[in-house]
Amino acid sequence: MTETSSTSSDAPLKSILSAVKRLLRPLVRMLIAKSIGLPTVTEILKEVYVDVATEEFPLAGKRQTDSRISLLTGVHRKDVKRLREKAESPDDKISITAPRSVGLGAQVVARWVGLTETTSETGQPLPLHRTNDNIDCPSFNALVESVSKDVRPRAVLDEWLRLGVARLDEDGLVHLNQAAFVPEKGTEEKAFYLGRNVHDHMAAATHNLLGEGSPTLERSVHYSNLTPESVELLNFAAMQEGMRALLTVNRMALSLAAQDKNKDEASRRINFGLYFHQDLSIFNTLTHGDGVTSEDAGE
C-alpha cells in the first residue's frame, strides 16, 4: 500500500521532469551547434534559480536569506551569495533589450500591416514608394518617421534589406516580407525573438500547469503519420490562416494602444504568436492521439 501511494505521488513530478527533458532537446541542440557547453549553461541556470527564488518566492515580512534561497533551489549557499552579489553589480547584468533593428522595426511593421492606408482590401501590406507620398498611401520614409525621427529611414531600409525583412522591386517600391518580422539573417535579431517568444509560450503553459488564476490561451493541432506532401499542404494552410489571425489581432492592438497611450494603468504587454513544426519525431511513440490540444482548458 505504501509503495502504491509513493508511486502515485511521484507521478506528477515524473511527468514534469519528462516534459522538461523533452523541451530541452532543441535548446541543447542549438547550444551544441553554437559551441556553448554545459558549464556555461549550468552557471546561467544557477543564476536563474536564484533570481526566481528571490523575486517570486518571498516570505511576507521577512528578508530573503541566502540559506532560504539555497533550501528552495538546491544551489549551494556560497554560490547563492556570490550570484546575489553579482546580480547587484551593473557591470554583470545581461541586457535583454531588443536590438535596435528589432525595437524600431517591429513598430514600423505593426503600423504597415495595421493601417488601412498601407494595406489592401484583403489586409495585405501594400508596396510603398521610398520617398514619394501620395493621397492614398504614405511613403516608406513617412512610415518610419511616424514611429521615430531619430533614425534615418534609409538606414532602416538598408538593415531590412540585409535581414531579408523587405525587398526592392525593379520600380523601386519597397515590399514587406510576408514572414516579417522574422529576419532571414542576423543572429542577434533571431536570438532576441527566440528568447522572447519561447519565454512567453513557456510562461503561458507554466501558468496553466500551476493553475495560477484563469487559464490562458495555449492550443495546438497535432497529427502524425503524414506524408511530406501532406505536411507541405498543412504548412501552407497554417501560414495563410495564421497570418490572417496575426493581422487581425495586430490591427486591434494598434488601435487599442493608441487609445491607452498615457493612461496610468497601461502597464501590460501581450504576445500572440504562431508556430509550425514538422519532423521525423522520435516522440511519435509517446503521442496520445491526434487532434486539437486544449491546453488552456487544462486538458
Image (cartoon, rainbow, N blue to C red):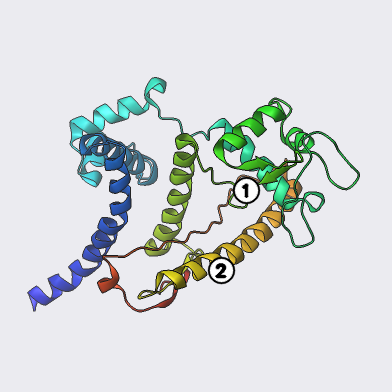
Q: In the rendered image of this protein, does residue 49 appear above or below residue 86? A: below
- Among the 4 quarters of the image, the one containing residue 231: bottom left
Q: Which residue is mark 1?
A: 177
Q: From the viewer's perspective, tell me whether residue 151 is left or right of residue 287.
A: right
Callout 2: few (<14), some (14-19), or many (20+) C-alpha neighbours within 10 Å? few
Q: Amino acid at mark 2?
A: Ala
Kindly check if marks 2 and 1 are in contact, taking CB atoms under 8 A apart as contact.
no
User: Which percent across, then down, holds residue 236?
Assistant: 54, 65
Q: In the rendered image of this protein, does residue 194 appear above or below residue 89? A: below
**What is the C-alpha distance between the residues marked 2 and 1?**
18 Å
- How many badges with numbers are in the image? 2
Q: From the viewer's perspective, tell me whether residue 61 is left or right of residue 269.
A: left
The quarter of the image holding the N terminus is bottom left
User: Which percent across, then down, holds residue 277?
Assistant: 42, 61
Q: Element at badge 1?
A: loop
- Among the 4 quarters of the image, the one containing residue 160: top right
Q: Earlier in the sequence, mark 2 or mark 1?
A: 1
The quarter of the image holding the C terminus is bottom left
Callout 1: few (<14), some (14-19), or many (20+) C-alpha neighbours within 10 Å? some
* Farthest right residue in view: 135
* Residue in the image at 41% along x and 55% along y: 202
User: Which percent across, then down, holds residue 97?
Assistant: 51, 33
Choose between 106 and 237: the one closer to the eye. Answer: 237
Q: Which residue is mark 2?
A: 237
* Residue in the image at 33% along x and 40% along y: 48
Choose between 86 and 28: the one closer to the eye. Answer: 28
* Residue in the image at 77% along x and 36% along y: 130
- Is residue 207 something that shows in the picture? yes
